[in-house]
C-alpha cells in the first residue's frame, strides 16, 4: 500500500492499494470518535480518492479492535459547541463532510467492527455497502444524551431500515447486535471478525473489476430513484447511462463476452 495524501492529523489514514482506497479512522484511544481535525481530513481524503482514476472503490474502517466509529468526540464539545457561534461553525463543517460523502461518485464500503454508534452509524450510513463483523454493535444514543439526529441523518436511517424500525432505534436508544442489524437491513452481511477485512477486500475487488462508468451510472441512478419525483435529476441519470453506451468499455465488454474472456475495463 502507498500513502494517499499528507494530512494535518495522524488520526486519519489514507492508503492506496491498487484499485482500492482505504480510509482509516485512527483514533483508537477514543474508540475512533471523530474530532474536528478528522472531519477536515475526511474531506481531503475523499477529494484525493475522487481525483485518482486508479482508485475505483473506497473502503472505510476503524483502527484498533474496539470500534468502527463510536460517534463524535465528546471531549471537544466544550470547545466546539459551547456557544451558538461555535455550534454554527461545527454545523457548517459537519455538513461539508456529509456533502462530500453525498457527492462521491465511486462506490463506498463500510467495514464495521465493534462499536458503530451515533455519529459512527451516521458515517456508516454514507456507505453504499455495509459489511459487519459478528462483534459489531449499533445504535443511536441521542435520546440518552439530550440531543437529536439531524434531518439528513434520520432520512438515511429511514432509507436503510424503514420508518418503524428507525423510530424504534431513535426512541429506545438501545444497542443492537450485528445479527439484529442484518435482519433489519442496516447492514448487507455479517461475517466472523477474523474474516472481515478479507471479505471487504473481496467485495471491493469484485466491484473494481467491473466497468467504472457502469458502476458510476448505477450509483447515481439509485440516488435519483430514492428522491421525491419532483427532485429527481433525470437528465443527469440519462447522461451517465448514455456515457456507458458510447464508451470504450462498452466495446471491450462486448468483445470479451464474444471471445469468452475476462474484460479489462479502462473507465473510458
Image: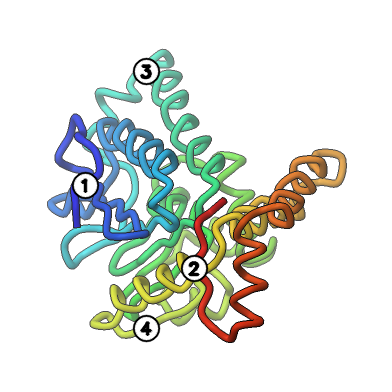
Q: Residue furthest top?
A: 85
Query: Going from the N terminus, do you reach mark 4 or mark 1 first?
Result: 1
Secondary element type, mark 1: strand
The local crowd at label 1, few if under 14, some if 14 to 19, many if 20 or more residues have their Cα within 10 Å, is many
Question: Along the horizontal axis of the image, is 47 left or right of 210?
Answer: left
The local crowd at label 3, few if under 14, some if 14 to 19, many if 20 or more residues have their Cα within 10 Å, is some
- Residue at horizontal 47%, vertical 79%? 189
Task: Quadrant for residue 257, please give it.
Answer: bottom right
Secondary element type, mark 3: helix
Cα–Cα span, label 2 and label 4: 30 Å
Q: Which residue is mark 4?
A: 191
Cα–Cα span, label 2 and label 1: 30 Å
Q: Between tags 3 and 4, which lies in front?
A: 4
Cα–Cα span, label 3 and label 4: 41 Å
For the residues bearing labels 2 and 4, Cβ distance under 8 angstroms = no
Query: Going from the N terminus, do you reach mark 3 or mark 4 first?
Result: 3
Q: Between tags 2 and 1, which lies in front?
A: 2
Q: Which residue is mark 2?
A: 264
Q: Which residue is mark 3?
A: 86
Q: Which mark is residue 13?
A: 1
- The N terminus is located in which quarter? bottom left
Along the line of sight, which residue is nearer the eye, 53 or 178? 53
Q: Position of residue 45 (x, y in %)?
A: 33, 40
Amino acid at each position: 500500500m502507498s500513502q494517499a495524501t499528507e494530512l494535518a492529523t495522524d488520526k486519519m489514514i489514507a492508503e492506496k492499494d491498487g484499485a482500492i482506497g482505504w480510509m482509516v479512522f485512527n483514533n483508537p484511544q477514543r474508540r475512533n470518535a471523530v474530532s474536528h481535525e478528522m472531519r477536515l481530513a475526511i474531506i481531503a481524503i475523499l477529494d484525493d480518492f475522487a481525483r485518482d482514476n486508479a482508485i475505483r472503490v473506497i473502503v472505510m474502517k476503524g483502527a484498533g479492535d474496539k470500534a468502527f466509529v463510536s460517534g463524535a468526540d465528546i471531549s471537544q464539545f466544550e470547545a466546539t459547541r459551547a456557544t451558538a457561534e461555535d455550534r454554527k461553525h461545527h454545523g457548517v463543517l459537519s455538513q461539508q463532510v456529509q456533502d462530500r460523502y453525498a457527492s462521491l461518485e465511486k462506490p463506498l464500503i463500510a467495514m464495521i467492527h465493534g462499536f458503530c454508534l451515533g455519529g459512527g452509524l451516521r458515517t456508516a450510513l454514507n456507505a453504499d455497502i455495509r459489511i459487519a463483523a459478528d462483534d459489531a454493535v449499533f445504535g443511536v444514543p441521542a435520546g440518552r444524551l439530550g440531543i437529536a439526529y439531524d434531518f439528513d441523518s434520520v432520512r438515511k436511517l429511514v432509507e436503510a431500515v424503514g420508518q418503524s424500525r428507525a423510530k424504534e432505534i431513535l426512541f429506545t436508544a438501545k444497542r443492537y447486535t450485528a445479527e439484529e442489524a442484518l435482519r433489519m437491513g442496516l447492514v448487507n452481511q455479517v461475517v466472523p471478525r477474523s474474516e472481515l477485512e478479507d471479505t471487504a477486500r473481496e467485495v471491493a475487488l469484485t466491484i473494481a473489476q467491473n466497468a467504472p462508468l457502469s458502476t458510476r451510472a448505477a450509483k447515481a441512478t439509485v440516488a435519483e430513484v430514492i428522491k421525491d419525483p419532483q427532485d429527481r435529476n433525470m437528465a443527469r441519470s440519462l447522461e451517465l447511462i448514455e456515457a456507458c453506451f458510447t464508451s470504450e468499455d462498452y466495446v471491450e465488454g462486448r468483445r470479451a463476452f464474444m471471445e469468452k474472456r475476462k474484460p479489462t475495463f479502462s473507465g473510458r
